[in-house]
Image (tube, rainbow, N blue to C red):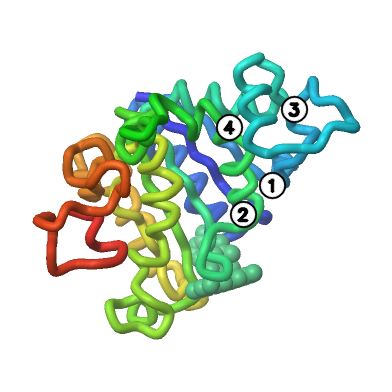
Amino acid sequence: MNVLLVYAHPEPRSLNGALRDYTVERLRAAGHEVQVSDLYAMNWKAVLDGDDHLDRAADAPFHPVLDSKRAYDSGRQSPDIAAEQDKLRWADAVILQFPLWWFTMPAILKGWVDRVYAYGFGYGVGEHSDVRWGDRYGEGTLAGKRAMLIVTTGGWESHYGPRGVNGPIDDLLFPIQHGVLHYPGFDVLPPYVVYRTSRMDEQRYAAVRDGLGERLDALWTTAPIGFRRQNGGEYEIPALTLKPEIAPDRIGFHAHIV
Ligand code: FAD
């Protein structure tokens, strides 16, 4: 199988750097092909702007959605964007690895999403009409592929528990797992989260590494998070609210998980 690891940490000698190296080794040892997009090492351009679209007239107003569509359709995207899209097409599974910074992914990784998920690739796929809102949330360009997050946090596990002060980790990661990964089609596996990173010693690191290894070994067999499919019959059209009989006692993020 082909695995793409999109990695966002500025320091190779960090905990994240060690876990990245281990991930690559473990997957290769199991016979998988691995590509790494090491965003800091690539000096990845994090901001989406008019320079991403090669044929745009310099004096024309920049329209992030329409210019993205035109450049994608005409094959005139910036080459760094097209290269990442090719890696995503190649991959059977995609891992996003990052330290939690201000309760979400580092800006450089958000910028990778903003730029690589072009109109026609990450969104704007399939029929858009009064009766259909495209192929998304379980359908789309990346359907049939698996995705997983590897995340490290300074906060303790209890801080991210159901009543923890930071909010539940599943809620904090929902916009990434549901919005960024399930939206263009991925089946999303439960995340591998390493909490309280400041309390890391050799013994704990060994346990963290082994736990990660087990998750990587099970990349093809772990049950995905049960995000509902937009076009699976559970949502009202065109409002896209859950039908009254679906999870009637639930609201918010968790209503969208079977
Ligand atoms: P490092 O600092 O590199 O390492 C952590 C520990 O692991 C160190 O003690 C190190 O010695 C040890 N270690 C490293 N490599 C090894 C190895 N190979 N073997 C054994 N031990 C090793 N945290 C939150 O919970 N929520 C937030 O919203 C949040 N926001 C942040 C925002 C910013 C801008 C920053 C800078 C930090 C934030 N943090 C937050 C904390 C952040 O999530 C952690 O600092 C980060 O996850 C730690 O990962 P690291 O790879 O940088 O670890």
**Looking at the rendered structure, which numbered label has been put on residue 53?**
3
Front: mark 2 or 3: 3
Q: CA distance from mark 2 to mark 3?
A: 27 Å
The quadrant of the image that shows the N terminus is top left
Amino acid type of the residue that numbered disc 2 sits on in the rendered structure: His
Label 1 sits on residue = 40
User: From where the camera sits, is residue 112 visible?
Assistant: yes
* Picture quadrant of residue 135: top left
Q: CA distance from mark 2 to mark 4?
A: 24 Å
- Residue 102 x, y percent position in the rendering: 57, 70
* Mark 2 residue CB less than 8 A from any atom of ligand 1: yes
Mark 3 / mark 4, whichever is N-terminal: 3
Amino acid type of the residue that numbered disc 4 sits on in the rendered structure: Ala
* Mark 1 residue CB less than 8 A from any atom of ligand 1: no
Q: Secondary structure at mark 4?
A: loop
Residue with the most extreme top position: 74
Q: Nearer the viewer, residue 65 or 179?
A: 65
On screen, residue 158 versus residue 48, left or right, reads: left
Residues under numbered marks 2 and 1 in contact, where contact means CB atoms less than 8 Å apart: yes
Q: Quadrant of ligand 1?
A: bottom right
Residues under numbered marks 2 and 3 in contact, where contact means CB atoms less than 8 Å apart: no
On screen, residue 94 versus residue 112, left or right, reads: left
Q: CA distance from mark 3 to mark 4?
A: 11 Å
